[in-house]
């Protein structure tokens, strides 16, 4: 989780000396852990209350799925294009 005071730091590493959000978020988190809730339930609850951007790693659900699929797909396309260009250049070099 990120601290939502505006710093964008990991919750336990908030750089603001007098952060007012960190203690309440830590208490909310520890209360849910003490209540025996699962990690997934806790993260869903906190994201629902504070917004999905409080999570460091987006969930693989709904529109957030695109945050996982698009970069991976773009990387695969770039690698494929690079390989295709290299093979074409190698084939042209053999012809000469």
Image: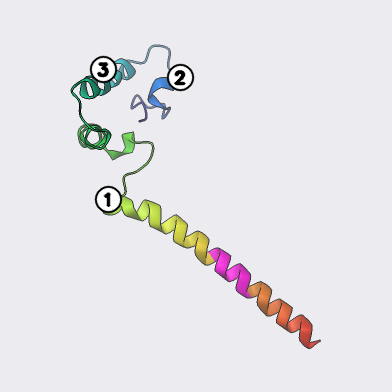
Which badge, 1 or 3, comes first in the chain's sequence? Answer: 3
Q: Residue at x 56, y 69 (%)?
A: 80
Magenta-highlighted residues: 78-84
Expressed as whole percent of the image width and height from the top left, the position of residue 85 reads 64, 74
The tag earlier along the polypeptide, 2 or 3, is: 2
Q: Which residue is disc 3 drawn over?
A: 27
Examine the residues drawn in magenta and state their main secondary structure. helix
Instruction: List x then y, in percent, for residue 46.
Output: 24, 32
Tell me which colouring the rendered structure shows: rainbow
SS label for mark 3: helix
Measured in 3D between alpha carbons, the distance from the residue under mark 1 to the one under mark 3, in whole angstroms, is 27 Å
The residue most toward the right is 96
Residue tagged 1: 61
Sort mark 1 into few (<14), some (14-19) or many (20+) by Cα contacts within 10 Å.
few
The residue where tag 2 is placed is 15
**Could you say whether the residue bearing mark 1 is in a helix, strand or loop?**
loop
- Left or right, 1 with reference to 15: left
Q: Is residue 27 magenta?
A: no
């Amino acid at each position: 989780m990120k601290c939502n005071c505006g710093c964008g730091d990991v919750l336990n590493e908030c750089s603001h000396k007098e952060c007012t959000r960190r203690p309440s978020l830590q208490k909310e988190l520890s209360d849910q852990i003490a209540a025996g809730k699962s990690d997934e339930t806790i993260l869903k609850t906190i994201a629902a209350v504070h917004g999905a951007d409080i999570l460091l790693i987006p969930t693989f659900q709904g529109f957030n799925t695109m945050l996982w699929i698009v970069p991976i797909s773009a990387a695969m396309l770039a690698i494929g294009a690079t390989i295709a260009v290299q093979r074409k250049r190698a084939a042209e070099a053999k012809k000469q």
